Amino acid sequence: MRASKRHVEDWLLQPPRGMNDWTPDKYYSLITVASKLSRVAESFGYSAIETPALEHFEVLKAKAGEEVINEIYYLKDKAGRELGLRFDMTVPVARVLSYRRDFPRPIRLYYVSKVWRYDEPQFGRFREFYQFGVEHVGSPTVQSDAEVLALAVKSLESVNLPQLTVKVSDRRIMDQLLDKMSISTARESVLRILDKRGKVTDDELIKLLIREGIDKTKAESLVAIASTRTPIVNSTGELRELGVGDDLINYVESLVNALTDYGVLDRVYLDLSIVRGLDYYTGFVFELYTDKIKLAVGGGGRYDELLKVYSGEDVPAVGFAIGIERVMLALSEEQGGVPPVDYYVYPMESSYYGMGVRIAEKLREIGLRVIVDVGKPSLRSALEYAARIKARKFIIIGRREVEKGVVRVRDLETWSEEDVPLDKILK
Amino acid sequence: MRASKRHVEDWLLQPPRGMNDWTPDKYYSLITVASKLSRVAESFGYSAIETPALEHFEVLKAKAGEEVINEIYYLKDKAGRELGLRFDMTVPVARVLSYRRDFPRPIRLYYVSKVWRYDEPQFGRFREFYQFGVEHVGSPTVQSDAEVLALAVKSLESVNLPQLTVKVSDRRIMDQLLDKMSISTARESVLRILDKRGKVTDDELIKLLIREGIDKTKAESLVAIASTRTPIVNSTGELRELGVGDDLINYVESLVNALTDYGVLDRVYLDLSIVRGLDYYTGFVFELYTDKIKLAVGGGGRYDELLKVYSGEDVPAVGFAIGIERVMLALSEEQGGVPPVDYYVYPMESSYYGMGVRIAEKLREIGLRVIVDVGKPSLRSALEYAARIKARKFIIIGRREVEKGVVRVRDLETWSEEDVPLDKILK
């Protein structure tokens, strides 16, 4: 082949930084994982939704929090509209439900969607990635919280995510404790600092808190509180000791009961350092972990104030999102693969091409994947090609075969051959 | 519910102009249509691919043509990279194949992907839309052209697109005719003007051509040539009369033979006004029409020069893309819908919630869609809700039932009820 001057530089041939090309060798795994996750959401009665990749920038930034807003891919369209690529699906779904008030509530929705965040790429962190998630909108009950958490766990169990654990906290618990300690300023910053627990040392956390104006004793107790990590089934004693009120203790007890009913209790821990990076959470929050990768594979919680931002109406809601690429990184086994080509049809002469097509069409009708050779390669190179694309069987249509009214079928795994009567295939 | 001050203005609650929210009532139709189209591509041995929504702007504009370049959603990321949302999948796939030269050729790929074009929205024209399409890369033969056209037709037949016709042309034919008429300048503009045939009057076309510097007689013959529209099976006589050379006549004859083998010939017309808006086409081009909507539902052709732009290597290729929203607009019947909820489980008291969950989990295991009530509504409002979301059956767990070791199952279509023993469900 003739090589001419390149028009586009080599580095531009790669996808933009932090984004992935999903060639078939990888894409079918993604499809398989996404289908398994979706099937669990379907079984819980959730229905699929999708929204535009682009949203009005004002919608995106309304309740995202500064950190996430800085990660939005922002653009102005030719009419001067300020738009941005969505960074999650919770915000777009909240927007949709604010004008589709005709859906009976509670509304159960799920999605498998791309989202975009301009973040520093690293292992398991991409600038374009897929989220599987659900939104359960219109119910304030602990049963809704439990349903959503159980659905998250069961979806990850359906793909055999190894060593799955869930860390649960509640923004209301931290609020009560901060109240008790008379910490009224910089609460969001305090929570964000505590959220770093495990990533930086406790000493470092204390220093950061002091820098926010918290005195040393309080900073130390806060870090001690954030170190609470106990199976949720045993957590109420500890919460009582910390001085958490009866209402929240009762809530945790009800949550424990419901999680027991779902058979997921033993995976769930109370971990008061969990905050979640998004400003829209208001109560129950959780993160999903596997011991295979350090980053959370997902998380969620209750966001009772978000819909009001769009519609002015108070609507309680709870949901979660799972990063599908992270799940795939944590799975040791290949999930699905490119489906095999069942037959490769090779007409020895171009006058037999029509017969090849008719045979192929018959086999396709019964659900098989069939390729008809479109070139004029030698039999040998056609066989090589068919083997490389992992075709299972190779059909030869030559003069000998046509005269006998058969085709020769070679099994490319066993290399055995047989003549098959044409009328048996074409009938 | 308390209504407070809205933060976000009403018009922002709608998706950005020209884009669609896919709520479940519509999204399942899209999924159904996309699956049927995909199944045909799979049966032809094509494998699924996906790429990032964002591409380097330089990649997008390399061979798109001015009109399309002006429609690109363009942005600079925070590092100053020039990016754009893809306007089709042909360009991204060409980019991927330019660095994945390990795939055995010919390569058969298909996709169901979103693309974005900043165009004036109108009936059937959106700024974000879904394309189903294939790329067949590495073969220059007429059999490849026929395979791709047949695949397009058969995919649309699989969703019962009414009154499907295909208009075929070839850029080489127009090139030969322009050569013969000694028209050497402004060829792209001439082709673009002829492409408007049917949208504006012939007189208008002639005026536009004259404005490009074509003299009146030639302009009139050009419009006459562009008026050629004849079943492709009868077209060779006409082409010969126009003075088209033997090589292209032979090509059309071979195409006719291959289309006959695929059984799609009667849908195909030669129409020399067909040009396609994208600059990357080099030979065979076609457009897909239904009599239900005016716009083409899809189109494609051969683009033997595109891959060279990225890799410097000559690689012949042919493909097509179909606009899924346009197909849906042309289909009279609903395609699929939200899958029904099989069971709605209603525990009369919160102490029966655990039993409700265990029943639901058993039913979900066998593939059913089951919702457990998460609130404390009255039986009546729970029944109303279940009816509104079109649940099929309603399971009541009350004191009477628990004491008898049964659940009451109400069929929400027939309104008949029966007691079902608990151990029959839970075993």
Image: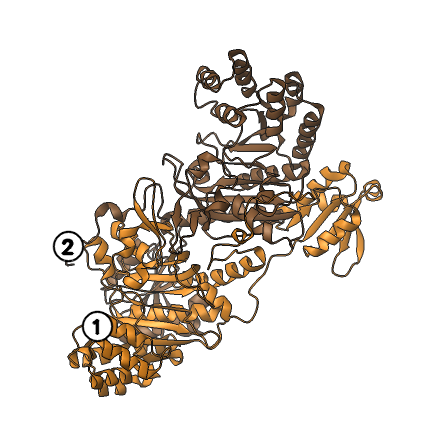
Chain colours: A orange, B brown
Circle 2 sits in a helix, a strand or a loop, which is it?
loop
Q: Are marks 1 and 2 in contact (CB under 8 Å)?
A: no
x, y (%) of residue A125? 44, 65
Circle 1 sits in a helix, a strand or a loop, which is it?
helix
**Badge 1, how many Cα within 10 Å: few under 14, some, many 20+?**
some
Q: Quadrant of residue B261?
A: top right
Q: Residue at x 75, y 53 (%)?
A: A384
**B101 sits left or right of A328 in the view:** right
Question: Residue A401: which numbered mark, if any?
Answer: none
Residue B423 or residue B77, whichever sits in front = B77
Tell me the mark number nearer the camera, choosing from 1 and 2. Answer: 1
Q: Residue at x 65, y 40 (%)?
A: B144
Chain ID for label 2?
Answer: B
Question: Residue B5: which numbered mark, if any?
Answer: 2
Chain ID for label 1?
Answer: A
Q: Residue at x 42, y 59 (%)?
A: A127
x, y (%) of residue B426? 42, 73
Residue A246 or residue A46, whichever sits in front = A246
> Can residue A250 be seen in the rendering of this structure?
no
**A411 sits left or right of B244 in the view:** right
Q: Quadrant of residue A249?
A: bottom left
Spatial CA span between label 1 and label 2: 24 Å
Q: Are marks 1 and 2 on the same chain?
A: no
**Badge 2, how many Cα within 10 Å: few under 14, some, many 20+?**
few
In the rendered view, tell whether residue B213 sits above or below residue A133: above
Q: Amino acid at mark 1?
A: Arg
Residue behind mark 1: A187
Q: Which image quadrant: the N terminus of chain A?
A: top right
> Can residue A196 be seen in the rendering of this structure?
yes
In the rendered view, tell whether residue A264 sits above or below residue A46: below
Q: Amino acid at mark 2?
A: Lys
